[in-house]
Amino acid sequence: MYKMKSRLILAILALSLLVTAATAAAEGYTHLWGGFSTPLAGRSPQQRHNAARAAADLNGIIVPPGATLSLNDILGVRLAEKGYEIAPMVTDKGTLEDVTGGGICQIASTIYNAALDAGLQVVERHPHSRVVHYVPPGRDATVAGWLKDLKVRNPHEVPLQLGMDASSERLTAAFRGIRPKNFRVELKTEIIPLEPETAVVSSSKWAVSPQKGGSGYSALTRRIIRSGDRVQDEVLSRDRYPAPTRLVGGGGR
């Protein structure tokens, strides 16, 4: 009962953020505060479909001053009844698993970077278990059911509108305000490559082909916000993306 009431409250809060794109345009949300774009090349048709489906629900949302935008609150559970399709998703173990709604993590990563550019505060953000190809290490965000969410808060005195576009070969997110922003944002990431671990596999027991492994990284991401003479330097995240294991044959008996 408690969980049902909590989700009902969250749903009501989420609905309070919704404003149609037409209304937003009429109110003058014409000044770009932060934007980001990621490539859709290499994504499956199902992943592209799910990204476009989620983008349609997010497009036109208004985040009032002091309000928090939650992707899970807005999108809800990704179900086939809502138009989502089965598509690959990276699991916590770094493997690909087919799930309904797979592929919307790219939505989360794109919005995350646009939010950073717009000076929004990060309330909740989770990295992938492995590196993803559409954003640099330390700049990704993943969502998973009700367990992992992306939440960003508007600390500004003006409301911001989120615009989404998935109609071309790129997925784009943009936050716009009713007046120009008065600060500049710089993102810096220190990346350290990680070598893959080596596992020796006996060829007499398993027919496993040698694998070179893959790239892994440790990433420290900072955001610097400059407004006049004021400089705010914050550490956004310290992330670790293990490298896929290198497999080598060990002979066997």
Image: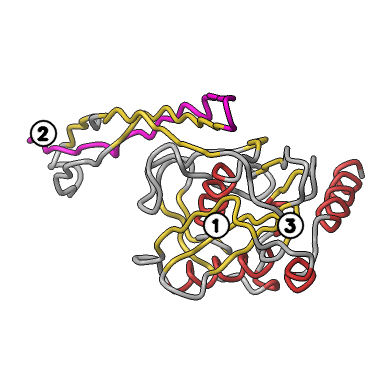
The amino acid type of the residue labelled 3 equals: Ile
**How are the residues colored?**
secondary structure
| Residue indicated by mark 1 | 107
Q: Secondary structure at mark 1?
A: helix
> Which region is colored magenta?
227-253
Rounded to the nearest angstrom, the CA distance separating label 1 from label 3 is 13 Å
Residue 224 % position (x, y) = 51, 30
What's the magenta bit mostly, secondary-structure-wise?
strand
Residue 41 % position (x, y) = 35, 66
Q: Is residue 152 left or right of residue 17?
A: left
User: From the viewer's perspective, is the residue at label 2 or at label 1 nearer?
Assistant: 1
| Residue indicated by mark 2 | 250
Residue 74 got which mark? 3
Q: Which residue sits at x=64%, y=51%? A: 180
**Picture quarter containing residue 62?**
bottom right
Rounded to the nearest angstrom, the CA distance separating label 2 from label 3 is 51 Å
